[in-house]
Amino acid sequence: MENRVCKLFGIKYPVIQGGMVWVSGAKLAAAVSNAGGLGLLGAGSMKPDLLREHIKKAKTLTDKPFGVNIPIFSKYSEDQVRVSLEEGVRIFFMSAGSPKKFTGYLKEKGCIVVHVTSTPTLAKKCEDAGVDAVVVEGFEAGGHNGRDELTTFVLIPQTKKMVKIPVIAAGGIATGQGIVAAFALGADGVQIGTRFAATIESSAHENYKKALVNARDTDTMLYLKSIIPVRLVKNSLTVKIEEMEKRCADVEEFKKVIGENAAKRAIFDGDTENGEIEAGQVAGLIDDVPSVNEVFETLIMEVKNTMEMLNNMEFSCF
Amino acid sequence: MENRVCKLFGIKYPVIQGGMVWVSGAKLAAAVSNAGGLGLLGAGSMKPDLLREHIKKAKTLTDKPFGVNIPIFSKYSEDQVRVSLEEGVRIFFMSAGSPKKFTGYLKEKGCIVVHVTSTPTLAKKCEDAGVDAVVVEGFEAGGHNGRDELTTFVLIPQTKKMVKIPVIAAGGIATGQGIVAAFALGADGVQIGTRFAATIESSAHENYKKALVNARDTDTMLYLKSIIPVRLVKNSLTVKIEEMEKRCADVEEFKKVIGENAAKRAIFDGDTENGEIEAGQVAGLIDDVPSVNEVFETLIMEVKNTMEMLNNMEFSCF
């Protein structure tokens, strides 16, 4: 039984590296593609010219397929799509917007189009819009998050019931155990974010990587639901956010306290007290900063061990 | 490899039926135990005398092991423990309170004690208090819920890293696929709630069962975080709750609008517009009201099929 995600992208392992602002530049994406997964450039933090540079650079670092993740709501999204096409990118992961906006156009250009979404009903709409696959991202995922708060555990099987296209599971996955669990629930592939954010090749600041390593089980929360929900590691900034949320402060006050470029401040500049440390709940499982190759070696070993464990189990009772 | 949960309770399948208010009386608990799982009487909605009746009745309906679930915060909890011991119950699932309160006493009496919790750190505290196993319940679970919002997908492996005692996963599990996924993540057993709430033997009102069947993917939310978080199916009552939450209404107003016995109103009396329909996110996967035996037959078939699917997969790529 050939894996549909591997076939779709022409990759060895059905493991996608999530596009992450200030984290997934050419270095990380190329390393993931070289290791047999699919690397994605996170265009969300790149103006079109910088995205072009990263695409050019990624092509010098790998001859394997890689893609771009473009948030549709961004004012740069049209230019990012244009630049990506000009530079020969053929794999597009689109997020944060309607699948109707670019899917038809990109399909006409011969591209593979994947849409990131957060509910089974929206996944069906993506399928209807003609995408090749969907990423369904659970409540446990880091960074921007859906409003319906469905978790990976319930999202995968419910999406699987509603669509025929391949389903890529995201949110909470950082280990081979998680990969097997996602496949058991019906996923055709997985998208991994936080685990790749804490690698040597991640372009994030060392302080940010350290914050992921230090984060324990209950150290992330979903904040800013009244604006755009985002999962962050707790710090001085989130204490202020929580206080404002408890008294239903207005949007203007949130904006003033959080300030401009809060994600860049923490992730790229390393101010992990006053910036937004985007990360998934799975940060509690992460306690090192290995190379991308080491991550893949561990994932592969864990998948094998997990399958062996399941097969040896007195699951025979079933 | 013998399953530790089966061994601990002397049961055939490592499947616990969650104790649910107004749902899990003698009929449901006995049916689950007869089918090879572990049935639990949900003492949360029973005064001590009624609990005694249900224990007596369950004993006439099954000669298999069954237990009680007792929320510690309840003013009846001491009497419920006493009555259970008097009637010969030896399996206690304790929730909503400190594991220090009853564990030592119950262990002295020769009982098996399990504590329900919602974070790996708290699971470790339960182990330190001497319990035999923990239930870790994820954010997707129905009814009352923890404050840290960890999902089942991240809760299982992080708890597994912190404790040696058996880990029973709860929240989001209603199928054999979910059981295999939970085991892949490290669980030793599963606790299933919502799926058993929508069975013939569940003592809930038909309207409540119908509400579970009708619930779609995004039809539950976690409400009342400023009081005690509870996951409910959306209805007229939750519209009012949401409106109050958006303007940070005070606790008194919430209490007035919700009124007394809101869970009983929906679950037992069948007023599914004005009562609290406790249910997990997995309600979206449930579309029938079978017998408990049929649920077990389906679970067993799904576990087998999922294991076969995983073994046939071009997981060989790993």
Image (cartoon, coloured by chain):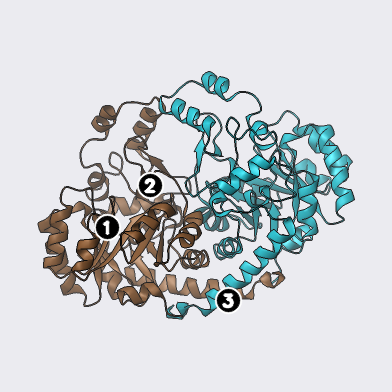
Chain colours: A cyan, B brown
Residue A180 relative to residue B304: left or right:
right
Q: Secondary structure at mark 1?
A: strand
What is the spatial separation of the Cα atoms under label 2 and label 1, in whole angstroms? 15 Å
Residue B60 tag number = none
Q: Which residue is mark 2?
A: B146
Chain assignment, label 1: B
Which residue shows up at 32% across the image and 76% down it? B11
Query: Nearer the N terminus, badge 2 or badge 1?
Result: 1
Q: Amino acid at mark 2?
A: Gly
Dot 3 lies on which element? helix
- Label 2: few (<14), some or many (≥20) within 10 Å? some
Question: Rounded to the nearest whole Å, what is the CA distance between mark 3 and mark 2?
Answer: 33 Å
Q: CA distance from mark 1 to mark 3?
A: 34 Å
Answer whether labels 3 and 2 touch (C-beta < 8 Å): no
Please state the chain letter of the residue tagged with numbered disc 2 in the rendered image: B
Front position in the image: B159 or B201: B159
Position of residue A90 measured from the top left corner of the image (x, y, whole percent)? 82, 48
Considering only vertical position in the picture, is A142 above or below B23? Answer: above
Q: Is residue A233 left or right of residue A202?
A: left
Name the quadrant of the C terminus of chain B: bottom right
Q: Residue at x 18, y 53 (%)?
A: B77
Quadrant housing residue A210: top right
Tag 1: amino acid: Met
Q: Is residue A153 above or below residue B298?
A: above
**Residue placed under numbered mark 3 in the picture:** A308
The answer, for residue B32, to whether it is visible in the render is yes
Mark 1 burial class by Cα count in 10 Å: few <14, some 14-19, many 20+: many
Q: Quadrant of residue B272?
A: top left
Q: Which mark is residue B94?
A: 1
Q: Secondary structure at mark 2?
A: loop
Type of the residue with mark 3: Glu
Contact, mark 2 vs mark 1 (Cβ under 8 Å):
no
